[in-house]
Image (tube, rainbow, N blue to C red):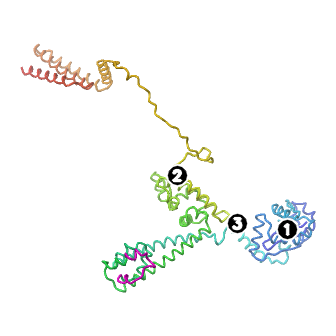
Amino acid sequence: MLVLFETAAGYAIFKVLDESKLQEVDSLYKEFETPEKANKILKLKHFEKFQDTTEALAAATALVEGKLGKSLKKVLKKVVAKEAHEQLAISDAKLGGVIKEKLDLSCVHSPAVAELMRCIRSQMEALISGLPPREMSAMSLGLAHSLSRYKLKFSPDKVDTMIVQAISLLDDLDKELNNYNMRCREWYGWHFPELGKVVTDNLAYCKTVRKVGDRTNVATTDLSEILPEEIEAEVKLAAEISMGTEVSEQDIGNIRHLCDQVIEISEYRAQLYDYLKNRMMAIAPNLTVMVGELVGARLVSHAGSLLNLAKHPASTVQILGAEKALFRALKTRKDTPKYGLIYHASLVGQTTAKNKGKISRMLAAKTALAIRYDALGEDTNAEMGVENRAKLEARLRQLEERGIRRISGTGKAMAKADKYQHKSEVRIYDPSGDSTIPSTSKKRKFEEVEGETSEQDAETPVAKSKKPKKEPVAEEQEDETAAESPKKKKKKKEKKAEEEEPEEAKEEEEEMPVSEPTEKKKKKKKKKVKEEDDE
């Protein structure tokens, strides 16, 4: 039996001298306690050394993935194929299937073989001659580092620290450029204020100022390389009638030096943007397709790294950058923000205000998938990002043009529109209009209304409270007038009757509206009572 053993330095093939020892799996380690005992069971037949760490990494990754590498294939053809009748003991069953399929060699993998591999590893320095221990440990450490980088998909092209620094520098350059442009316009505006209104582009303004200098030179200066013909003509016309003050040549020199700085920074900014664009396409192509280079780079910078961003859920990606607004809303118990840095993506920007929240939520969900695919996936293409962006654009068109359709219950079936049903108002004929005879007389109706109003007044507590108050007052007055003369009694009785009449009239006024003739009669009665009192 032959044994294939993989080391950091190369492939080693051993020949088993005593196969009977392999049957005792539990006590096999005792046979490898010393190098002398190990050499009695195994003998090194061939050792294929790796040329460099790159070859070692390629061989190790092929073994991890269960593939047959080129170097291993050569070794097996050279050594093992000569003794095809013997079995080959290997540590990976998947690799054994590939070897058997391609080279037609019988491979063995069992618990006894796994225990044998552990024993070989313990006495590897004694079994493999010609390898110094120091060199072996150095190669093992280098291969371990390389293999770890490969497993984590770590490579110089995948360093997202450069993206974080580049986007931060780009934002700083934008701020500085804005300050420099404002200072240049304000400074040169004292000499030629009309130029700022004619030339709106900052870079073109600085190039024009650097080339012209004093405004008296505008008529003789060719600005066709910087400005279009129409704007050039406006600038020359404005220079003739300019209201600016005169400045010295030293002032113009300083202004030109500032313009040089603005032009140099603008060129460097364009170069930095191209670098950032290429780096984003190399590290996160799907994220770049979904939200663009700048928004994607700002998301990575805000999270700290692409791997940290991949750990965030879609809801966090949606509001990343709006933390202040989120915590303020939670504190005041108001509506939380719908978007953060993702608001500046082109898909969100081209939607109406009504649909921005929906699109930002859908874009965040697809962006979270794209980030995880870029950070943890093996492929480096942008097919998934392009496909998801097409879906979002189709959904956006559906929201903008046709409105939102009702989605079916399964969520996978196609959206179905409701069937059109004509709903008409049906009016029922009223037969009461056919009869010319009134069903009830007006007097009867009037009496029924009177009865209803009196019942309502009786139910109210105000009407009840009036009567008990009046009765004790009337009884007291009767007791006082008992001792008086009969003439005075008659007059007082008449007065009481007169007082009760207007009170009853007031109650009737509350119950129902009183006609004008009744009011006139009451006035006449009051006049008569006054005349009697006077007599």
Q: Residues within 10 Å of mark 2 (few under 14, many from 20)?
A: some
Comparing labels 2 and 1, the label whose residue is closer to the camera: 2
Q: Which region shows up in magenta?
A: 215-234
On residue 399, which mark appears?
2
Tag 3's secondary structure?
A: helix
On screen, 349 above or below 410?
below
Q: Is the residue 79 above or below the residue 440 in the image?
A: below
State the CA–CA distance, disc 2 to disc 3.
43 Å
* Label 2: which secondary element: helix
Residue, far bottom = 249
Q: CA distance from mark 3 to mark 1?
A: 24 Å
Which label number is shown at residue 343?
A: none
Q: Nearer the viewer, residue 169 or 251?
A: 251
Amino acid type at image mark 2 = Leu
508 sits to left or right of 370:
left
The verdict on residue 417 being magenta is no
Q: Earlier in the sequence, mark 3 or mark 1?
A: 1
**Residue type at mark 1?**
Leu
In 3D space, how far apart are the residues under numbered discs 2 and 1 (Cα atoms)? Answer: 63 Å
Q: Quadrant of residue 57?
A: bottom right
Taking depth in this image into account, of 418 and 334 the one nearest to the observer is: 418
- Confirm or deny contact between disc 2 and disc 1 (CB under 8 A): no
Q: Position of residue 250 (x, y in %)?
A: 37, 86
Image coordinates for residue 79, horizontal then vertical, percent: 88, 71
